[in-house]
Image: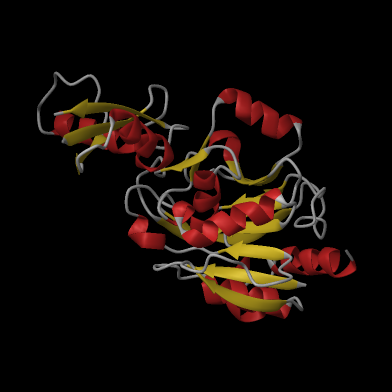
Amino acid sequence: MKARVHVMLKNGVLDPQGEAVRHALGAMGFDGVNGVRQGKVIDLDLAEGTTEADVTAMCEKLLANTVIESYTVELG
Amino acid sequence: MHAAVVVFPGSNCDRDLAVAFEAAGAKVSMVWHKDSELPEGVDIVGVPGGFSYGDYLRCGAIAANSPICRSVAAHANRGGYVLGICNGFQVLTETGLLPGALLRNAGLKYICKTVGLTVETTASDYTSGYTAGEVIDIPIAHHDGNYFADADTIAQLRGEDRVAFSYAENPNGAQDDIAGILSENRRVLGMMPHPERAADPVHGGTAGAALFRALTGALETA
């Protein structure tokens, strides 16, 4: 089984990197960008028997810092 | 006083911290990240600055889950003292020993310079050698020092007098200018600035030495 974890800064947490990307896009002439948020994608190659609950525990304990980040898990 | 300084792969302020503890009269043991136990009789654990595990995933995240950090957390939960500086502060927030998190600097740049720090409280064994409101010159050197916590947490920290130091001029976007915070029992201190880099005349400043002297004084008599 494979799992893809998306980790994003929570709404309301300033994302200076996203802001820098937005500024750069604006400077390049892409005027239509109102906001940019940058996150992480983590792909997990999981052994047989690993459950979605296990992946959630991985997110809670290590992959995301839930003080500042939210995460979603896609199993595939 | 017996201090243990944790060494992670990528720590680079571990020796500076050990020297600062020793200069204040402490006995120091260096502890490797793979060790699972702290040495017998340790009064305080120093979690040093640097780039533990290359700052992979998030600053401090992997260090916070290393074998030694379980012992550091147990030590803190027993009422032991822990001082986390710079990357060490990031590690302590990742372990949950201190609230909040350290985000990328608002200006996106790594900042290395001496800044003015306001001593917000003298009611701790770290800050009792200063006077409240005093501004001390201490270097910062970080890319992710922008302290973040939700509004309730900030209000709680202020309400409980747990902000140890704040920036006289905010260099990194930290909420409420916060540079260092204390745990509820006031025995765990995390701070982004480096007192161990201002602890000897050859450093160009000695304002940090009072922190180590205060600690040694408090823990020797304890």
Residue A34, image quadrant: top left
Q: Position of residue B134 (x, y in %)?
A: 76, 52
Q: Is residue A69 above or below residue B57?
A: above
Extreme residue in the right direction: B221
The one of B173 and B27 positioned closer to us in this rendering: B27
The residue lying furthest to the front in this view is: A49
Residue B137: x, y in percent?
64, 60
**Residue B129 image point, x, y percent:** 82, 60
Left or right of B195 on screen, residue A22: left
Residue depicted at x 71% and y 57%:
B81
Quadrant where the N terminus of chain B sits is bottom right
In this picture the colour scheme is secondary structure
Quadrant containing the C terminus of chain B in the rendered view: bottom right
B35 vs A22, left or right, is right
Q: Quadrant of residue A72?
A: top left
Note whether residue B113 is visible: no
Q: Going 48% across and 66% down the picture, which residue do you hit?
A: B33
- Classify A59 as above or below B137: above
Q: Nearer the viewer, residue A38 or A55?
A: A55
